[in-house]
């Protein structure tokens, strides 16, 4: 779980390992996606091993799920390997005060 404010971005890096924690390769470039692009956008690196997520919408109580899919089969077949990250977007620190006037009226 990652928590970030509605004004932040964050770099993500993949670490792909085998069942014993040793570095492992995948076939092709991993593909990144966001469950809700209106709240959290993703720009993947050319090699697919890095990405930057950017908060796009206001704070909400429901996290946005980021997923990345890679092909674990190094041969001609396809064996999907999926990584998931939940991202919660919270309100940022206040930076502006706007004063909205009402309609002027005559005094009694």
Image (cartoon, grey):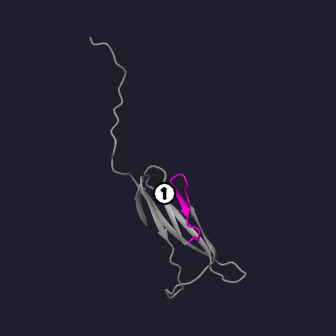
Question: Which quarter of the rendering shows the N terminus?
Answer: bottom left
Up the image or down, 80 lies above or below 9; here it is: below
Chain part drawn in magenta: 34-48
Image coordinates for residue 12, horizontal then vertical, percent = 48, 68
Instruction: Residue at 50%, 63% (x, y): give it.
Output: 52
Total numbered circles: 1
Up the image or down, 86 lies above or below 6; here it is: below
Q: Nearer the viewer, residue 33 or 49?
A: 49
Q: Is 45 a magenta residue?
A: yes
Q: Is 79 a magenta residue?
A: no
Extreme-top residue of the structure? 108
Q: Nearer the viewer, residue 72 or 108?
A: 72
Image coordinates for residue 44, horizontal then vertical, percent = 56, 65
At numbered mark 1, what does the secondary structure look like: helix, strand or loop?
strand
Instruction: Residue at 54%, 60% (x, y): give it.
Output: 42
Instruction: Residue at 45%, 62% (x, y): give it.
Output: 10
Q: Nearer the viewer, residue 65 or 46?
A: 46
What residue is shown with label 1? 54
Q: In the displayed structure, does residue 56 sit left or right of residue 70? A: left
């Amino acid at each position: 779980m990652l928590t970030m404010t509605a004004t932040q971005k964050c770099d993500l890096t993949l670490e792909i390992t085998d069942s014993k924690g040793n570095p492992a390769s995948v076939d092709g470039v991993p593909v990144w996606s966001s469950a809700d692009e209106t709240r959290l956008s993703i720009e993947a690196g050319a090699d697919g091993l890095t990405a930057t997520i950017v908060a796009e919408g206001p704070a909400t109580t429901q996290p946005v799920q980021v997923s990345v899919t890679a092909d674990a089969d190094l041969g001609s077949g396809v064996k999907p390997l999926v990584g998931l990250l939940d991202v919660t977007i919270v309100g940022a620190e206040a930076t502006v005060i706007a004063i909205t006037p009402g309609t002027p009226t005559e005094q009694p």
